Image: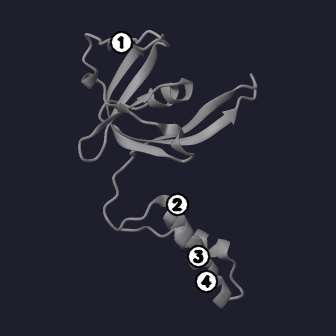
Amino acid sequence: MAEKKKWKEIKSDRDDSDFPETWEFNEGKNSELVGTLVEVRKNVGKHNSNLYTLELEGGKRVSCWGCAILDSRLAEAEMGTEVRIVYLGKKDSKTSGSQYNDFRVFKLDIELEEGELEDEEIDEELNFTAEKVAKKDEDVEPEEIIEDLEDVELE
């Protein structure tokens, strides 16, 4: 007759509530984490990794494990900086041939007022307008219109 086993949970003295939930970036390509960098813990875990904590809008805190790419990019962000981390998926290393997780990291440069356009949106609008004007006036090239508009000083 098989012996019945009784299991007892092994507990730690450490308070795990001290660690926020971890961002599962590999849930999908282009998943992103946006928040304010509020803490960096160094040499955490068995790999002595950095653990970054971001405070999301609404106050929830989420942690993100560091790697070579994130460590180098987030080294440029000061505490209190709003950052956006975008997971780009797995990439093949050109030197070693192994795969790594690739990310893009952004920091909030300036906060736009509601209704303001970002530079890329302004460029798109400018090109669209120049092309429309050039269609109406066949003697003018869109590039000439853009050059003239770039010289205009806005108030």
Do the residues under discs 2 and 3 have CB atoms within 8 angstroms? no
- Mark 3 touches mark 4? (CB < 8 Å): yes
Q: Which quadrant is the C terminus positioned in? A: bottom left
Q: Position of residue 81 (x, y in %)?
A: 34, 37
Question: Which residue type carries mark 4?
Answer: Lys
N-terminal-most mark, 2 or 3: 2
- In three-dimensional space, the C-alpha distance between marks 3 and 4, rounded to whole angstroms, equals 6 Å
The residue carrying mark 1 is 6
Instruction: Sort mark 3 into few (<14), some (14-19) or many (20+) by Cα contacts within 10 Å.
Output: few
Alpha carbon separation for disc pair 4 and 1: 78 Å
Please tell me which of labels 4 and 1 falls first in the chain. Answer: 1
Q: Nearer the viewer, residue 9 or 114?
A: 9
SS class, disc 3: helix
Residue 68 position in % (x across, y down): 55, 24
The answer to which quarter of the image holds residue 56 is top left
Query: Quick check: 117 above or below 65?
Result: below
Q: Quadrant of residue 11?
A: top left
| Front label number (3 vs 1) | 1
Q: CA distance from mark 2 to mark 3?
A: 12 Å
**Mark 4 packing: few (<14 Cα in 10 Å), some, or many (20+)?**
few
Q: Amino acid at mark 2?
A: Glu
The residue to which callout 3 is attached is 128
Identify which residue, 5 or 25, lies in the foreground: 5
**CA gap, disc 3 and disc 1:** 72 Å
Residue at the disc numbered 4: 132
Instruction: State whether residue 148 is above or below residue 73.
Output: below
Horizontal side of residue 75 vs 126, given as left or right: left
Is residue 41 or residue 77 the one in the foreground? 41
Q: Which mark is residue 120?
A: 2
